[in-house]
Amino acid sequence: MRLLERDAPPFHHVFLDWIMDLNRTDDDDVYMEFFENYGTHFLTEVKFGASFTYEYKMATSTYKKETSEGVDVAVAASYSGLFSVGGGFNMDSSQKEAASSFQKKVTTRTITIGAAPPANGDAMTWASTVKESPVPVSYDLRSIEDLFSERFMTADYMQAYDLDYQRIEKKIKETKQKYCARLRDQGLVNNCGVLSPGLEMKKSRLYTDFAATKASTKGQCVEECLKRTSCVAITFCQGSECEDYNKEVCYMYKEGMETGGADDERWTTVIILSELEDLLKLSYTGINSHNKRSIEADEKVTTLDSCKSHCLRDVYCVAFTFSENQEQKEKCSLYSEKGMALTRKDGATTFFVSPTKHT
């Protein structure tokens, strides 16, 4: 089940009443009550089904004996699971023997989500009952202020309401942290830290994308990027000021492509460092930041490789810039995560670094 944003269903009349209440006030208590009724996020996609899991327990002494004899216990467990769910007809005799031997050396527990396990523990019997009682097995969420965006608030049926939805969106963002603090004080949540999807740089944009899609918010743009295995960065511009650049279009970028960056007040760029395998290269690009450490030429950092090595040895380094300009004293600059912005710079190349590459 998925929310079709381009043809979203109308809001429920009770929710519309709440929208009008929010439109009339900036009272924190009213917004808190709104969160109590509707939460801080809404569902955009839900997948229904069920799961059937075998949990195996093996004595430590048995495990050590098996591994010392060259048995791959993990492989034997997979054979056992496959055999138990009726996949034995695809297994050869040695695989069936490994599965049988494994089952004799473990205790097995069946864990199901959705349909209850059958009395005989048979997975095939269980599978035949799943369609009668499916449950949510995965879902996607969006922050509730995303509903107060142009895409949802300018539908034809909403024209009768005189809404300052941008003010409501801003107020929701402000009040959510207060609401979380209240839940934390009640012991209902552990913390209210903001989880960042990546390294965000305001007033910065990238060029030469490999894919583009519609997105109502920066967060949705990042979500679209994460759905693509090769995407490591996005550039997003939102609002009427971006009409010249295809308003509300999410541009995506991948490792290994030829791209560059520049400063632009209307754009925000997010580099998803955790998705990088090695480096994201931006040609003719520099970085403006107060968190900069320059490696001067007299430290014998005169090549790209030596500049990269300095960054990889610095646990706080998330990006470095190397200049090919022979007259420039600062050949290599390292940057930590806070307060960065891209800028166009001839002769300079900027690289963002995968966290897994630090030595």
Image (tube, rainbow, N blue to C red):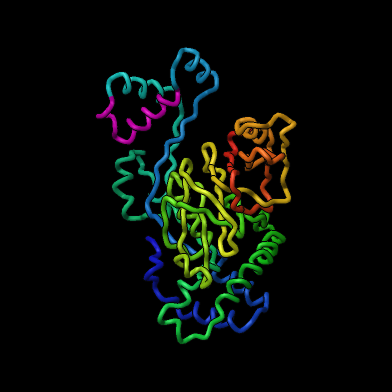
Q: Left or right: where does residue 112 sit relative to residue 295?
A: left
Expressed as whole percent of the image width and height from the top left, the position of residue 42 reads 50, 64
218 is within the stretch colored magenta: no
- The residue drawn where x is 28% and y is 26% is 91
- The residue drawn where x is 61% and y is 60% is 203
Q: Left or right: where does residue 102 sit relative to residue 25?
A: left
- The residue drawn where x is 62% and y is 74% is 31
Name of the residue lying farthest toward the front: 327
Q: Main secondary structure of the magenta part?
A: helix
Name of the residue lying farthest toward the top: 69
Name of the residue lying farthest toward the left: 89
Expressed as whole percent of the image width and height from the top left, the position of residue 332 reads 67, 38
Q: Do we see residue 359 in this rendering?
A: no
Q: Do we see residue 299 in this rendering?
A: yes
Q: Name the one closer to the observer, 183 or 321.
A: 321
Q: Quarter holding the N terminus?
A: bottom left
Q: Which residues are magenta?
A: 73-91
77 is within the stretch colored magenta: yes
Q: Name the one closer to the observer, 200 or 164.
A: 200
Q: Name the one closer to the observer, 284 or 309.
A: 284
Count numbered badges in the picture. 0
**Would you place residue 68 above or below residue 7 in this image?**
above
**Would you place residue 117 above or below residue 62 in this image?**
below
- The residue drawn where x is 49% and y is 59% is 220
**Would you place residue 359 above or below residue 280 in this image?**
above
The quadrant in which residue 26 appears is bottom right
Q: Left or right: where does residue 237 sit relative to residue 87?
A: right
Q: Name the one closer to the observer, 248 or 118.
A: 248
Expressed as whole percent of the image width and height from the top left, the position of residue 55 reads 46, 35
Q: Quarter holding the C terminus?
A: top right
